[in-house]
Every structure is written in C-alpha cells, then in structure tokens.
Image: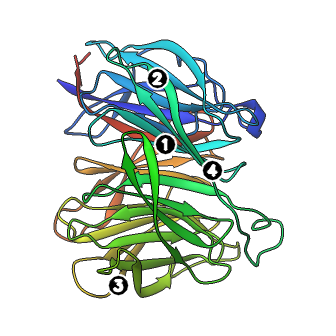
Amino acid sequence: MTELVVVGTFTAAAGGRGAGIHGFARDARTGDLRELAPPVPADEPSFLAGSADGRFLYAVDGWDAGGVRTLAITPSGALQDLGVRPAGGAVPCHLTVSPDGGFVLVAHYGSGSVSVHRVNAGGRLAERTDLVSFEGSGSVRGRQDAPHAHHVSTGPDGTVRVTDLGADAIRAFTLDHGRLRPGPVTATRPGSGPRHLATHPDGRLFVANELDATVSMYRVAGSGELREEATVASTVSPGRNRTYPSELAVSPDGRFLYVANRGADTVTTFGAAGVAVEPLSETPVEGEWPRHLALIGDHLYVANERSHTVAIFAVDARTGVPSFTGRAADVASPACVVAVQGTRVAGP
C-alpha cells in the first residue's frame, strides 16, 4: 500500500501554469510519486490541508474574491470536487483544520484577515463563524504597506497563531466555538516579514522571515507572548540572487529544521535539538524557486515553482541531510505538497 500525497498549484490569475490539484500515490520505500488521475481543476489552489480522518481535502481558492474548496477523498485516492464556499477575504494563501476537525481557518494575504468556517458532518464547509481583520504596516515599502496574514496554525496547546508579514507581527488567538478570541501579539524585528512557522516537539516555534532572509526561534513565555531566543540567516550560501525563505519543517524527533530558500534555490538543514539554531548543511533543490517543502516519511519533497517539478530527496536518518534521489514529479507551478494523514491507496 502507498500513501496519498496531494500537490497544489498556481494557476493563471497568479501568473502560474498550474492546472489544479494533483493526487499522487507515494511509495514509502523509494519516495517516488505516481500520479493517480488528471488534476482536479481549481482556481489558485496554492495551499491544501487534509482532514484528520483522511476523508476530505480543503484548498484555498480564488484570488481577489477568495474561497475554500472541499474535495472528498475516495478509498482509491481519487479526489471528488464538492464545490467552493466564499471565505470572506482576498488572496487566501494558507489554511488549517482545527485539531477537533470542526473548523477550517484561512489566512488571507490580500485583505490581511483570518476567517473561520464550520465543517458539517459530511465534511463540507458550513457557515463562516468569524472573520478577523488586522491593522498595521511595516518598514518595507511595497511589501509592508498593509497587514498581510500569511500563515495560520494551531499549536499543541490549542493556541491559534497567525504570521502577519505586512505588520511584522505574530498574532495569537484562542478558538472558542468558532470565534477567535484575541491573545498576545508579538512584534517581530522591523522589516523581517514573518511568513510561516513550524512548531518543535518541545513547544519552541521557528519562523521563516521572508523579507530579511532569516529564521527566528521563539519560546512561549508565561504570559503567552513569544520570546525571541535566536535569529540566524536562512542560508549560508546566498549566491548572487536575493534570498526569500518560504517554508520550514521540523523533523518528528526534533533534531533537525529544514528551510527552503527561494533565490538561493537551496534547502538549509539546521540542528534544532539544542538551545541554538545551528546550520549543518545546504542542499541545492535541483530546480528553481522552492515555494514549499514537506517531510514525509524518510523523504523531503520540494515544490520548485518556476522549474515545474516536485523534487524528491532521501533524508539521512543520522545526519538529517537530504540528498537528491535523481527523481522528481512533473507538476506545473507547484505551490505546496501535503501528505493526507490516514489515507492509503493501492499500488500499481
């Protein structure tokens, strides 16, 4: 049996060549990806999230008028489009499913807001239960003239955190019966542009800062605010092009942190087990503009947006360093790679 891996893409509105949402069977031993069917047509499905039971997939949809698309996942791994509901914001770029599976939360880059949507018993989105709009700006003209929510996730303690790239802030909330109750707001360094975050098994948070090409490590203080403990460059070999870190992931055992660097076109491996964030190695992504990466089993998958591939790397269990397997899946304008938990599909 093999796992289901889905890939979201950028389509025409964002200048991409993508055709929609792709479903692949992943060979757990080799890491290879085998496309199961033609992609499901969708409008800018640049980020995806699966339900905890593996029966449904949610995708951001649309550009100026954003929505959320729901897809059912059959036992064979086929994706069935169940339609789109308006999300209430512009340029939805990230989403997550609440730990209890009852709500989908969406970050809207264009409108600087986060929306919350109830999930009904059949997996479809029901009514929107909340919409929170942010205020603020930053110091980088053209990128920080307004708030830009870029990432939303729920931590092990139930805290919802949103990175606001436009206002240099990480905003905390409590999800209370579908409503977002405001918590502490952590100001990041001026001009850093916090983009995405990842949570370490011990509760630390790592944040990829897009605008100053750094990675920051935070601990949660007693007040619930985040305390910055370290910041390092996201790449040790930036080359001639400016670097824009995109996605990051922590290994399940907490020993390693992986950061994708657009511009440098590398993945940096950091040691993450101790109190410091230590660069260990830097690996070319075998493509251009790594928009996203995902650790799945013993492999690292990198969505190379501008070279139209998902490159496959084997991760050394001892050193944590990824090495290119020589194989990649051809996907036009890939934007994210997600393993759907709890879903297995038959092999060829």
Q: Secondary structure at mark 3?
A: strand
Contact, mark 3 vs mark 2 (Cβ under 8 Å):
no
The span from disc 2 to disc 1 (Cα, nearest Å) is 13 Å
Q: Residue 278 got which mark?
A: 3
Graded by Cα atoms within 10 Å as few (under 14), some (14 to 19) or many (20 or more), the crowding at tag 2 reads many
Tell me the residue that label 4 is attached to: 113
> 44 or 292: nearer the eye?
44
Q: Is residue 68 above or below residue 147?
A: above
Tell me the residue that label 1 is attached to: 95
Q: Residue at image x 65%, y 35%?
A: 88
Circle nearer the N terminus (2, 1): 1
Q: Quadrant of the C terminus?
A: top left
Contact, mark 1 vs mark 3 (Cβ under 8 Å):
no
- Residue 332 at least partly seen: yes
Graded by Cα atoms within 10 Å as few (under 14), some (14 to 19) or many (20 or more), the crowding at tag 3 reads some
Graded by Cα atoms within 10 Å as few (under 14), some (14 to 19) or many (20 or more), the crowding at tag 1 reads many
Q: Quadrant of the N terminus?
A: top left
Circle nearer the N terminus (1, 3): 1
Contact, mark 2 vs mark 4 (Cβ under 8 Å):
no
Q: Residue at image x 61%, y 22%?
A: 42
In the rendered structure, which amino acid carries the disc numbered 3?
Glu
